Amino acid sequence: METRVMNENHSALSGGTEAVAGATETGAAAASIEVRDVDFYYGSSRALHDITLSIPRGLVTAFIGPSGCGKSTLLRCFNRMNDLIDGTSLQQGSITINGVDIYSRDVDVIELRKRVGMVFQKSNPFPKSIYENIVYGLRLQGIRDRRVLDEVVEKSLRGAALWDEVKDRLDDHATGLSGGQMQRLCIARAIAVEPEIILMDEPCSALDPIATMKVEELIEELKKSYTIVIVTHNMQQAGRCSDHTAFFYLGKLIEFDRTEKIFTNPSIQQTEDYISGRFG
Amino acid sequence: MNQERLEHMRGIFRGPLLNLKDTLLMMASLTDRNLSLALSALAERNTEKANVVESEDSVVDKLEVEVDEMVVTYFSTHGPMATACRVAFCGSKISQALEGIADQAVAIARRSRMLNERAELQSEVDITEMGRLVLSMIRESINAFVEVDPDRAAPIVLRDRQVDEINKANERTLNNIMAQDPQNIPAYIHLLFISRSLERCGDYAKAIAEEVHYLYTAQDIRHEHGFNPKS
C-alpha cells in the first residue's frame, strides 16, 4: 500500500509559483530543492528509503518525526555534510537545487556549503570575536576591504536581529554571549556569505523559551529572503514557524503537505498519531 | 485590571489572534448594520432595506465558518495555553453569537416585509426602544472586547433582564390587543415574533459579554444570576 502521500498540489510546490516576492530583496534569491528517489546508507545500513519531495523556495519547511527517522540525515544531504562521515553514500536518486544535481562530480562542495548554510542544534561560534566570526567566511574568499567587511557584519547581524545587542562590543569574544545570542550569531555567520538556503537542525532545542521565541521570530523574517528547512522535535514550533511539514518514520517519508493540513487533518493515521503524541 | 495585565492582554493579539480579532470585528460591524437596517425597515415600512438585510446575511455566515477554521488551525498548529487558548475558544463562541444575531435580523426583516403588505398597525408596543437597547448591548460587549475591559462587559448581563422584561410586557400587551382586534391577529403575531427575536438578540449580546469577561479574567459568569460586577 502506498503510504506516502503528497498533497494534491504537489506539482505546484516545486515550481516558482510559491516564490516569495521579497526573495530577491537582499540579492540572494531563495532556491528550491528537489529530492527524487533518494536512498542513503551509513555503511550497509539504509537510513533513507526512496525519498521524493519538493521543497518550495522562499518558504519554511519543517521535518518532523521520532528520533532516528532520518530527518537530520536528509537535511545534511542538502549541503553534503554527510560526506564528512566515513562510509556514507547516496546510492540512488538525486538531489537538485535550482535544477543542478548537487551530487554530480563537477559540483564544488565548498561553494555548495556557502550557498546552503547550516545552523546546528548546539551553537558553534568560532573561538574568535563576534566580528571575526561573521567575516571568517568572507576572509576565506579573499575579501580584505575593511569597509566591505564592516558593511557585511552590520547587515548580517541586523539580519539575525542581533546588531542592537552587540554593536558596541564587536571585538568581544563570541563565547561570552548568551546561548540565544550565540545561536543568532551562528545564523548571522551563515547569512554573511549570502546563501540561498538555510538548514536548521533543531536550532532551539538548547535554548530557553525567550531565546527560542527570538529565533522563531527571526525565522519568520529570514524566509523573506531564504528557503529554510528546519528539523524540530517541537510540534508547536513546526506549527508556528513552517509553511510545509514533512513527517518521516523509519527512514521513509510518510506525509508531506502544507503545515495547516498536516496539523488539522493529516491524511495518514500514522501522522495523526505522531503529532498527537501517541508515539515518538 | 492593573496596567501590567492590561498591557499583557493587549499584547496577546498578534499574528493569528490578531487576524481572528479583525475577523470578529468585521462580523460585529456587519451584524450591527444588519440589525439596525432590519429595525429601520420595520420602523419605516421599508421593504428595500428588509431585502438588503436578507441578501447580506450570507456574508456573516461565511465569516463564522472562517472564524472556526482559523480557530481549529490555531489550536492545531500553535497548541495555545492560558490567555491565548481562551481568546481562540471564546472567539469561536463570540462568532456563533454574532451569527445568531444576524439570523434574528433576517427574521425581523422578513416579518417587517410581511407587515408592509398590510395596513399600518396602531400598536402600543415600542419595538424601537427595545431595539435601541439591544443594539447598545451588542455595541458595549464588542467595545469591551476591543478595549480589553471586562468590567464593561459585566453590566450587560444585568441589562439583558431589562430586555426580557420588555419582551414579557410586549407579549401581555399584544395578547390584550389581539383579543380586542382579532381581524389583525396575523399582523400582531409578526410583532410578537419580532419582539421575541429582539429578546433572543439580547441573550446573544449577553453571551458575548460573558465570553469577553471570561476571555480577559478567566472568570466564568454564565448562569450566575446574582452576579455583581463590583464584587
Image (tube, rainbow, N blue to C red):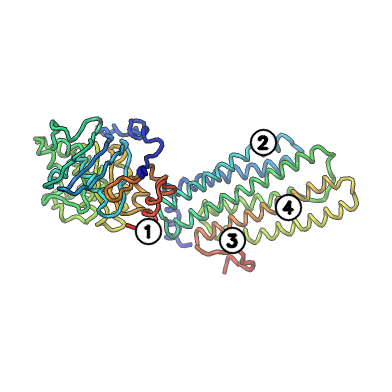
Residues behind callouts 2 and 3 on a single chain: yes
Residues behind callouts 2 and 4 on a single chain: yes
Which residue is labeled 2 in the image? B52
What is the number of the mark on residue B196?
A: 4
Total labels: the figure holds 4
Q: Nearer the viewer, mark 1 or mark 3?
A: 1
Name the chain under label 2. B
Q: Is residue B151 left or right of residue B76?
A: right
Q: Is residue B105 left or right of residue A4?
A: right
Rounded to the nearest angstrom, the CA distance separating label 2 from label 3 is 33 Å
Q: Are marks 4 and 1 in contact (CB under 8 Å)?
A: no
Give the residue at x 70% y 42%.
B38
Percent x, y for residue A30? 27, 35
Which residue is labeled 3 in the image? B154
Residues behind callouts 2 and 1 on a single chain: no
Quadrant housing residue B37: top right
Quarter of the image that includes the C terminus of chain B: bottom right
Instruction: Classify A104 as above or below A63.
Output: above
Q: Nearer the viewer, residue B66 or A245?
A: A245
Type of amino acid at the residue the image marks with label 2: Val
Label 2 or label 4, whichever comes before in sequence order? 2
What is the number of the mark on residue A278?
A: 1
Dot 4: element: helix
Q: Nearer the viewer, residue A25 or B197?
A: B197
Type of amino acid at the residue the image marks with label 4: Arg
Q: Are marks 3 and 4 in contact (CB under 8 Å)?
A: no
Q: Nearer the viewer, mark 2 or mark 3?
A: 2
Q: Nearer the viewer, mark 4 or mark 1?
A: 1
The reply to whether residue A164 is in sight is: no
Rounded to the nearest angstrom, the CA distance separating label 2 from label 1 is 51 Å
Percent x, y for residue B65? 54, 45
Name the chain under label 1. A
